[in-house]
Image (spheres, grey):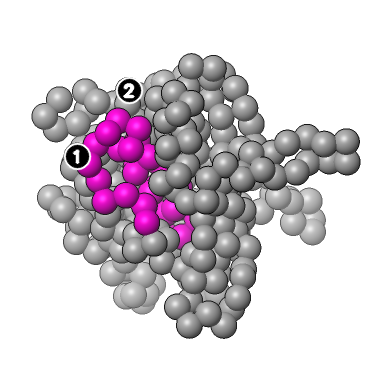
Amino acid sequence: MQGTIAQVIALVLEGNAALRGIRSPGLDSVHSAMTFCEFVRFVDLDKTPTGWSERQVADDPAGWFCYLKERNVSELRMSYGASRIPNADGAKVTDRMLVGFVGGGGRWRVHANGPNGSDHWEARWTVGDRQRADQRIWQVTYGRVAKDQAPGADVPSDLHTLRSDLGDVLERIEAFATAHGLPNFATCFARGLEDLAAASPVHAFHKEFANASLIPLEAIQLLSAAQSSWVFGGMGSWNDLGFEGDDQAAYESLSEELYRTANLAIVAATNASAAGRNSDRPGK
């Protein structure tokens, strides 16, 4: 899973914990979603006679959580929106094919819901010093790109159904990979299936997401499986493959289905940490 997506997940999970006063490790520099970041800052956008200027409101996630709490924000949620990027022929390039590029693969936002509506925050990732010994080369700035929006309808997501849907496509795409002599990719899909059935993540990189005090088991399983089976990127990734005839059509269909289902699972599982989901959590 791209770090840009993982960091949005982490912000929502840890932010909701902070807003509700739940003890959690937090989102400091040792969190796996912060590993390669020089800084993660938060800015508001002010309109000026010559355009827009940035006004910093927090210099790290912990400061941002305090900023939100002071403004009576009750919960954070994440959203995914498909992009609309045409290729040279005018046809739309799918997000699956663009996700390996920074800023590609769709738009991931954090929605901060409060008494006046919902504020939307979106990240900008830029490269700083490539020669840093600690490899923290990314400079990340989240900007408030929309203010006081009407909150989206809170339609409860059926985590059980999403878990079944993700398992179904993983079984079919694993069989495809095996049949076409792609054992490394088949292993990724098999690991995703294992995580869907595990009581704790077996293969996921971001193990901090497996926090039973924040999200229910099915949400943990979905986030773990999405990470383990995430094969979308640039050169050398699943996206870089090609086949002939009907095999190509099957590859395209399965790939798009997995990408779509994984994104639905990521959003639903992450948003299970929002205040309105308390009834879904163990012990509630």
User: For this rendering, which residue is in front, 187 or 226?
Assistant: 226
One can see residue 11 in this view: yes
Tell me the magenta residue range.
Answer: 1-28
The magenta stretch spans residue 23: yes
The magenta stretch spans residue 14: yes
Q: Amino acid at mark 2?
A: Gly
Instruction: Look at mark 1 in the image and give the residue it sits on.
Output: 213
Q: Position of residue 197 (x, y in %)?
A: 16, 50
Instruction: Look at mark 2 in the image and give the residue it sits on.
Output: 276
In-image side of 93 versus 69 (left or right): right
Task: Report the predominant secondary structure element of the magenta stretch.
Answer: helix
Determine the secondary structure under disc 2.
helix
Q: Amino acid at mark 1?
A: Ser
User: For this rendering, which residue is in front, 138 or 96?
Assistant: 138
Q: Which residue shows up at 56% across the image and 29% down it?
A: 119
The quadrant holding residue 23 is top left
Q: Are marks 1 and 2 in contact (CB under 8 Å)?
A: no
Q: Position of residue 244 (x, y in %)?
A: 54, 69
User: For this rendering, which residue is in front, 250 or 122?
Assistant: 122
| Residue 105 badge | none
Q: Is residue 167 above or below residue 215?
A: below
